[in-house]
């Protein structure tokens, strides 16, 4: 029993330390690609996306996204899996900050306040049980 507790605590400690780049490489790269350009007609780009402000990216990573979304003038209509049961609050904050400072995004988002694990925790608690936001709903529930 103590051994299992030890293993679990080590796993949690290790995942808390994963950088945004590590989280992106593990969970995001398959759909959004190494360059953040996504897959045309299937998965939207994160590079140059207007949806990285405020609480919207936290909601999307925590609870997923469904339905149409327009990014850089193109419409995508697919489903993004929710990662809230897989990623810690710190990992979600790390990956959002990684995306905001990668590719061409740093010029757009350098004036946005940093996303912290407390921000993620607050959204997680406020919208507990939410699943697969639509972009309209994510916008309207700031």
Image (cartoon, rainbow, N blue to C red):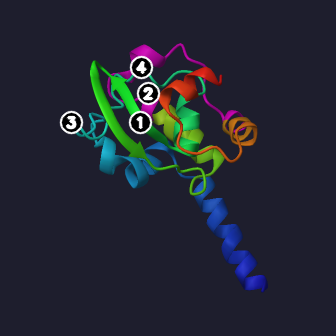
Which numbered disc flags the more N-terminal residue, 2 or 3? 3
The residue range painted magenta reads 99-119
Give the alpha-carbon distance from disc 4 to disc 1, as whole Å.
Answer: 17 Å
Q: Secondary structure at mark 2?
A: loop
Give the alpha-carbon distance from disc 2 to disc 3, as whole Å.
Answer: 22 Å
Which numbered disc flags the more N-terminal residue, 3 or 4? 3
Question: Where does label 3 land, which residue?
Answer: 40
- In the foreground, 113 or 58: 58
**Circles 3 and 4 in contact, beta carbons < 8 Å:** no
Give the alpha-carbon distance from disc 3 to disc 4, as whole Å.
Answer: 17 Å
Other residues around mark 3 within 10 Å, as few (<14) / some (14–19) / many (≥20): few
Q: Nearer the viewer, mark 3 or mark 1?
A: 1
Question: Where does label 1 land, which residue?
Answer: 67
**Circles 3 and 1 in contact, beta carbons < 8 Å:** no
* Residue drawn at point x = 42 percent, y = 15 percent: 108
Question: Where does label 2 land, which residue?
Answer: 101
Tell me where residue 56 appears, x and y as whole percent.
55, 28
Q: Secondary structure at mark 3?
A: loop
Quadrant of the rendered image containing residue 72? top left
In magenta stretch: residue 116: yes
* Residue drawn at point x = 62 percent, y = 53 percent: 16
Give the alpha-carbon distance from disc 2 to disc 4, as whole Å.
Answer: 14 Å
* Residue drawn at point x = 67 percent, y = 76 percent: 7
């Amino acid at each position: 029993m103590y051994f299992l507790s030890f293993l679990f605590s080590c796993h949690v400690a290790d995942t808390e330390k994963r950088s945004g780049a590590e989280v992106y490489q593990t969970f995001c790269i398959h759909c959004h690609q190494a360059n953040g350009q996504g897959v045309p007609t299937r998965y939207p780009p994160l590079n140059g996306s207007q949806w990285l402000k405020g609480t919207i990216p936290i909601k999307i990573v925590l609870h997923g996204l469904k339905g149409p979304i327009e990014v850089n003038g193109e419409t995508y209509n697919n489903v993004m899996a929710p990662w809230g049961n897989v990623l810690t609050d710190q990992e979600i904050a790390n990956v959002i900050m990684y995306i905001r400072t990668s590719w061409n995004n740093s010029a757009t988002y350098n004036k946005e306040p940093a996303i912290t694990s407390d921000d993620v925790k607050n959204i997680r608690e406020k919208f507990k049980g939410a699943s697969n936001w639509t972009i309209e709903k994510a916008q309207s529930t700031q």
